[in-house]
Amino acid sequence: MHSPLNQDLKKKVAELLVVRASGHALDSQRQYPLWELPNKHLKFLLNEGVGGVILHGGSVQELQQRCRELRNWSSKPLLLCADVEEGIGQRFDGGSFLPPPMAMALRYLQDRQDALDLSEQYGKCIGNQALKCGLNWVLAPVCDVNSNPINPVINMRAWGEDPHIVAELVVAFHKGLVSQGVLSCAKHFPGHGDTTVDSHLDLPIVEKELFQLHETELIPFKSLIEKGVNSVMTAHILFKNIDPFQIATFSKKFLTNLLRETFTYKGLIVTDALVMNAITSHYGCGEAAVMAFQAGADLILMPEDPFQAIDSITAALIDGRIPFYRLDQSIDRKQKEMSKIKSISLESVEDNLFSDKVFETTFDYKFTKKLIDMSIKFKNYAQIKFVEESINFVRVDNIFSSSSFLSSSSPCLVIPEKNGYKNILSHSLGIDPWETNSHKPFILERFERGSFLLQLFLRGNPFVGDSHFTEPWEKIVEQLQSKGRLSALIVYGSVYLWQNLSNILYPSIPSCFSPGQMEGAQEKILQTFFKANQKQSRIQNNDIQFTD
Amino acid sequence: MHSPLNQDLKKKVAELLVVRASGHALDSQRQYPLWELPNKHLKFLLNEGVGGVILHGGSVQELQQRCRELRNWSSKPLLLCADVEEGIGQRFDGGSFLPPPMAMALRYLQDRQDALDLSEQYGKCIGNQALKCGLNWVLAPVCDVNSNPINPVINMRAWGEDPHIVAELVVAFHKGLVSQGVLSCAKHFPGHGDTTVDSHLDLPIVEKELFQLHETELIPFKSLIEKGVNSVMTAHILFKNIDPFQIATFSKKFLTNLLRETFTYKGLIVTDALVMNAITSHYGCGEAAVMAFQAGADLILMPEDPFQAIDSITAALIDGRIPFYRLDQSIDRKQKEMSKIKSISLESVEDNLFSDKVFETTFDYKFTKKLIDMSIKFKNYAQIKFVEESINFVRVDNIFSSSSFLSSSSPCLVIPEKNGYKNILSHSLGIDPWETNSHKPFILERFERGSFLLQLFLRGNPFVGDSHFTEPWEKIVEQLQSKGRLSALIVYGSVYLWQNLSNILYPSIPSCFSPGQMEGAQEKILQTFFKANQKQSRIQNNDIQFTD
C-alpha cells in the first residue's frame, strides 16, 4: 500500500473527501473539537489532495481569513462549503440572518409571485455573501417536503409541505443562488420530509413505496436537476420497502439506478455527514466511505476518520471491488462543476469589505427586515396589560446554540424587563418548570404571583430531537389562561407548535407567531405589544391557514 | 461655541476621551449596543481627535483588524485598551485565559519567590499578546486589597488580602507587563477592596479614615507609583469620612491632593467608566466629565455621551471653571506616557500570526497549564462512586458571560455525561432549584433519585452582584450530604465560597477547588475524579490556609 503508485492513487481518492474544520483559525478556538480537525491534520490532508472543507463557526471576517488560509494549504482548487440554509448569519456572525424557508411557503399561499421573488432574492443574498467570505459551495436548498408536521429535523428548514410549492420555491431560490457564482446542493435525497427521527441521533426508517416517493418527495429534486443543480446530498434513511438492505446513502438503487439512470443526473452526489449517529452506530468509518462511493456517491462528507476513509477506498479500488473508472468519473464531475464557480481573488478584496453596509449591503438589510415583517403574524396585537409580579418566561431549545438570537441585550429580555417583568430563561438542559403527568403542568408555586408573558423559541433543529412536541405547552397555555395568568403568547419558530397553541388560545390574549427567531423579530413584536394603544387593540383574525 | 477657535479647543479636549467600541467590525455584531458606539459615530469622533478606545468582544483576529481600522480612522496616535486582567482570552477568543490573580496570592503563602516569578510571567503573557492584537494599554493590575471577603466585584480579581503581598505581586506583574512595551494601569484608586456594593450597580460608601487607607488600601498603589505605573484608575466610591461631598473619581482631595501632591504621581489619571450606575444615577453626563477633569483626572473613560462630554469640558474651560493649563498638562502627560509604547506595525505582522503556537506560544500555553495545575486544590480526590440516576448539577452566575469556559463540549458537561450522569445547567436567570427559607433548600422532588455532582462556577464578577453570597449553598451541601446524595463538590471561582463549603463538608466526599473556571481546569479535575483508582483514594488534607 505504500508504493509511489498507491500514493498517487490515494491523492486522487483524497480529492473526493470533504472534511470538517472550524471557521476559527486556532485549534483552541474550535467549538466542536471532536469533529473539527486540528490544523496539523488539516494542513497535512489538504497537502495530500483532500478536495473540500465544510466550515462552521466564527465571524464572517474570520471565515474569510480561514478560507484564504485553507486555499494556501491546498495544492489545488478547493471546495469550501457551509450549511448556510438560512443566511450566512445562521452560522457566521456578521452575515444576514433570514427567517427560515417555511416562511416563504406561508407567503406563497397569500401571494405566489411575491414568494417566488423573495425566494430568488433569498438565494442571491446567501450566494453573494458566501462568495465574499470565501465559500464557493452552499449546502442548500433543502428539497425535503415537510409532509410530516412532527418532523424533528427538517420542519421549518423545508420550503413547504406541498411538493409542487416546494419545487417552485427551490427553483427560484436556486436561480438566485447560482447567479452569484457559487455551487448549490439539493438535499436530502430522496427526501427527508416524512420522518420522525433525526438522523443526527438515530436511523430513520420510512415505509413508503417508490411510486409514493415519485408522487411527493422526488418532485423538487427532479425540478432542480432539470435546472442543473450542482450537487445532490443523500439522506441517511432506510426506505425499507424500496431497498431493505441499505440506507439511501449506501444504496445503489437510489444513487445509481434512480438518480443517475432514471433522472439522468450529471452533477455531483455528496453524502450527508458520515459522522452522524445513524451511520457511526452501525458502520465502521472506512466501511461507510467505501459503501457510499460504491453505491454511486462522488464526494464523501465528514468521514469520522479521513485517513481511514482514504485508505479504505484506495484498497477497494485496488482489489477491484470498485472499478477505477468510477474514480475518474467522480473527479471529472467535480472538476466540471467547479469550473462553474465565479472566481474572485480573496487577496484583492479590500479590508473595508467588512464595514457596515458593504458586507451586508443596505439591500440585504432591507430584504431581511422585509422578510421578517412579512413573516410575523399577529393573532391579537392588543397591548399587554401589566400586572404586579409578572414574569417574562423565555424558553429555548438549546442554550448553547441560541447565541445567534439570544444575548443579555436581546429585545425578548430587555423590553419586558423595562416594562416591569421579571425575566426567567428556561432551556432544555435546565430544571423543568413542569410536571409532565399533570393537568396543571406548570409548577406555579415556584414563580411569583403575576401573569406570564410566554416566549417560546422552539423549532425543529438538528440534534435537538423532538423536544417541543413532547413538552406540555398546550397544557401550560390552558392552565395559565384558565387562571387568568397568561398575559401574552409568542411563538418564534415552529408553525406547527403555533397552530396547536393558537387553536386553544382565548382570542382576548395578545399573541403572535414569527418563523424567525432573530432579534429583529423580537423587537418588532414586543414593541407592538408594549406600545400599541387602545385604539389598535382589536382582535385580528388573520390566522394562518396552512395545514388543512 | 462654533467658532474655529472653539473647534480647535474641542479637538484638544477630545484627546482626553476614551470611548467604548466593540472588538467586532460591524455594528450588527455589537454585543452591547447601548454602550458600544456605532461605527459612524466612532469614525466621526476619532476624526475629531478622540484620544482612546476601550475594546470588548470578538476574537483576537477580529481585534487586530479592528485596532488597525481604528488607527486608520484616527488623525493621531491612539490609546487602545481593554480590561484583560486575567489574560487576553478573558475578553478575546483565542488568547491565553489565566486563573485569576488571587491564585498567585494563594501561591505566595506556599512559595513567595515562585509566586513572584509567576506574576511577572503573567504580566509578560498579557502584555505580549495585547501588543500582537494591536492594544497598547492594559487596564491592569487591580491594586485593590480584598480585605472584605464578601466583596462582590473585586474578590478573585485582587492579588490578595494582605496589602504587602498585593504590593509585591502587582509590582512583579507590572514589571512583566511593561517589559513588553504596553502601558499599565493601577486600579481602582484609592482602593475598592473593602466594599460590599458593586459600583456597576450602585454607589459604594466606605467609612474608613485616611490613615486607615494609608495602612492598607494605598500601599500597593504607592509601590506601583514608585515603579512608574503609566496610569491610575479612579474608584466610584464615596469615602464619607475623607471627602463627604464627592466620590473619589470627582474628588480633588483624592486625585490632586493625595495622588498628585502627596504621592507626587506624574503619570496619567483615568476615571473608571462613567457609564456605571454609581455615576449615571446621580449625575448628568457632561457634568460628570467636567467634575472628574476638575478634580484632577486626565482621561475620561466611557462617558455616557462623548459629544456632550467634549462640549461640557470645553465650556468649563472657556468660562474659566477649569484653567487652560490643566488641559495642556493632561495632554502632555498623555504624550509622555504614549512615548513609552513599543511601536509595532500591525501591517507588517504576517497573517500567520494567528496560527497555532504563534499567537499563543508554546511557552504561554505551558505557562497557563502550569498556573491551572498549581492553583487547583483537591481536598479529597477519591474516585466518584456512580449511583443510578445521578445528576451533574452545574451552576453558573451568568449564562451570557460564561462562554469563555462553558459550551456544549466543555469537560464539566461531557465527562460526567460519559460516566452516566444527567446534566442540569442552572443559572441565575433560570428557575431557582431551591426554597431560600428552608432547611431543606434543594427541592429534591424536582430531580431524579440519584446523587449530585455539584459544580459551582461562582465568583465575584462585575454586574453579577453578590448572588453567590445570598444563595443557599451551605444549606444545600448540608442537606445533600446528610441524605448521602452528594457524590462530589467542585467550586470553580471564589475561594471564600470554597472555604465556607469546605468547612462543613464530610471529609469522605470527593471535593476540589479551582480559582480558574476554564476548560483546562475542568478537565484536570474531572479526569482525576473519574479515573482515579482505589490506590489513590485517600483523603488529602491540603486545605488552603488563607483567611485567618
Image (cartoon, coloured by chain):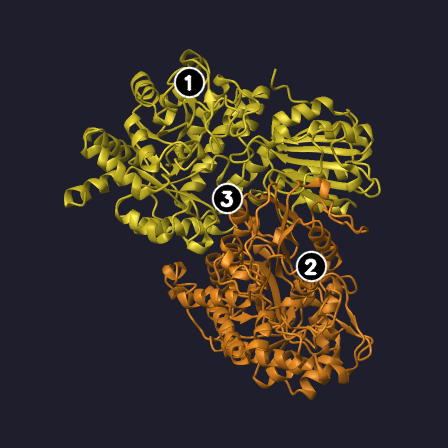
Chain colours: A orange, B yellow
Which quarter of the rendered picture does the N terminus of chain A lie within? Answer: bottom right
- Residue pointed to by mark 1: B240
Outermost residue to the top: B211
Residue at 43% from the left image edge and 15% from the top image edge: B213
- Residue pointed to by mark 3: B95
Q: Residues within 10 Å of mark 3 (few under 14, many from 20)?
A: many
Alpha carbon separation for disc pair 1 and 3: 41 Å
In front: B125, or B185?
B185
Residue at 74% from the left image edge and 68% from the top image edge: A288
In front: B203, or B473?
B203
Q: Quadrant of residue A488?
A: bottom right
Q: Residues within 10 Å of mark 2 (few under 14, many from 20)?
A: some
Residue at 50% from the left image edge and 38% from the top image edge: B87
Q: Secondary structure at mark 1?
A: loop
At label 2, which amino acid type do we have? Phe
Q: Secondary structure at mark 2?
A: loop
Alpha carbon separation for disc pair 2 and 3: 30 Å
Tell me, for residue A463, which label it has, or none: 2
